């Protein structure tokens, strides 16, 4: 009903939840990634886009239009939230202590109608997300470094990895899936300026570090960077398809491959494989 309740607390939420990306606790990390995945699906990372007025949009709906949608009822949200207009409900909220997570500084204003500063709250949240994005990427790099170390520790004296159970394999696949989805939504929700900063951070990480034992997760990072940004320009049949993420990764990962060790070359080729997977239209 009133997103500003969450948006006003977003800076503190982001600051506190960064600790949830913990290379020593996969379960906690998984839950934090799911939270971030859901968050970036709704709140853009950076930018100051013109936001639609939801209340006006609802009023402007053409109920008689034949757009292929079955119209069941009117005023669904108004009916659902009619209880919030009750004086008993408002007094109950106003009596809450400030320490309660449900406490609202101006319950009457929030419940009586849309907040005139809703757009400002959203834009501030978007800028907060932009500042948070680089810190989040640093945490992702820590996960990749730790994955490589754990894989090396898991190998015996013969250099052969210890046998994994079916449960371990299922957990690893689920973690990789959530990681990929989070990163894809993360990069796709960025504005151009934030994407450039994030891309610079990723290319620096790939250029300075080689993590052969974490090649799979590193390739997911490259896949997310290269599959979420396209620049189409041209007229008619002459269309130029540009992918700034893939172009930047290609120049780093393909550089001097013939002069690198086998492990380093294979690592970069696996990262390139991830980058090219969905890099085209």
Image: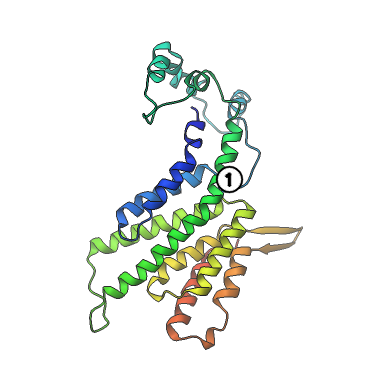
Residue at 45 percent of width and 49 percent of height: 37
Asked whether, in this view, residue 22 is left or right of residue 73, the answer is left
Colouring rule applied to residues:
rainbow
The image shows a total of numbered marks equal to 1
* Relative depth, front residue between 187 and 57: 187
Point 45% across, 25% down: residue? 104
Quick check: 54 above or below 265? above
In this orientation, which residue lies closer to the viewer: 234 or 176? 176
Residue at point 55%, 20% (across, down): 113
Q: Is residue 276 visible?
A: no
User: Is residue 247 shown to the viewer in this render?
Assistant: yes
In the picture, measured across the screen, residue 239 lies left or right of residue 19, that is: right
Left or right, 230 with reference to 74: right
- Residue 32, compared with residue 248, is above or below; it is above
Residue situated in front as seen by the camera: 209 or 229:
209
x, y percentage for residue 78? 49, 20
Compared with 190, 90 (above or below) is: above
Provide residue 179's location: percent of width, then percent of height. Answer: 41, 57
Asked where in the image residue 193 lies, by quadrant, the reply is bottom right
Above-or-below relation of 71 to 125: above
Check disc 1 and report its element: helix, strand or loop. helix
Residue 10 in percent (x, y) is at 48, 40
The quarter of the displayed image where residue 58 is located: top right
Q: Which residue is the extreme one toward the right?
A: 235
Q: How many residues crowd mark 1 within 10 Å: few (<14), some (14–19), many (20+)?
A: some
Quarter of the figure with the C terminus:
bottom right
Residue highlighted by disc 1: 127
């Amino acid at each position: 009903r009133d997103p500003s309740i969450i948006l006003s607390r977003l800076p503190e939420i982001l600051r506190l939840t960064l600790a949830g990306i913990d290379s020593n606790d996969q379960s906690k990390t998984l839950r934090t990634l799911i939270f971030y995945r859901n968050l970036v699906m709704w709140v853009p990372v950076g930018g100051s886009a013109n936001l639609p007025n939801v209340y006006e949009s609802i009023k402007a709906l053409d109920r008689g239009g034949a757009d292929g949608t079955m119209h069941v009822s009117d005023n669904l949200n108004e009916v659902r939230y009619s209880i919030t207009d009750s004086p008993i409900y408002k007094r109950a909220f106003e009596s809450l202590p400030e320490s309660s997570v449900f406490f609202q500084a101006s319950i009457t204003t929030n419940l009586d109608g849309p907040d005139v500063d809703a757009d400002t709250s959203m834009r501030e949240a978007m800028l907060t997300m932009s500042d948070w994005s680089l810190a989040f990427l640093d945490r992702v790099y820590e996960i990749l470094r730790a994955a490589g170390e754990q894989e090396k520790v898991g190998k015996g004296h013969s250099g052969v990895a210890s046998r994994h159970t079916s449960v371990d394999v299922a957990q690893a696949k689920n973690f990789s899936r959530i990681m990929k989805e989070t990163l894809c939504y993360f990069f796709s929700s960025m504005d151009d300026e934030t994407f450039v900063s994030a891309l610079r951070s990723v290319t620096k990480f790939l250029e300075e570090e080689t993590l052969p034992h974490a090649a799979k997760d590193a390739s997911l990072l490259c896949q997310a960077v290269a599959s979420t940004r396209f620049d189409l320009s041209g007229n008619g049949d002459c269309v130029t398809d540009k992918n700034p993420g893939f172009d930047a990764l290609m120049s780093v990962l393909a550089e001097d491959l013939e002069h690198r060790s086998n492990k380093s070359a294979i690592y970069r080729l696996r990262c390139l494989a991830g980058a090219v997977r969905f890099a085209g239209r």
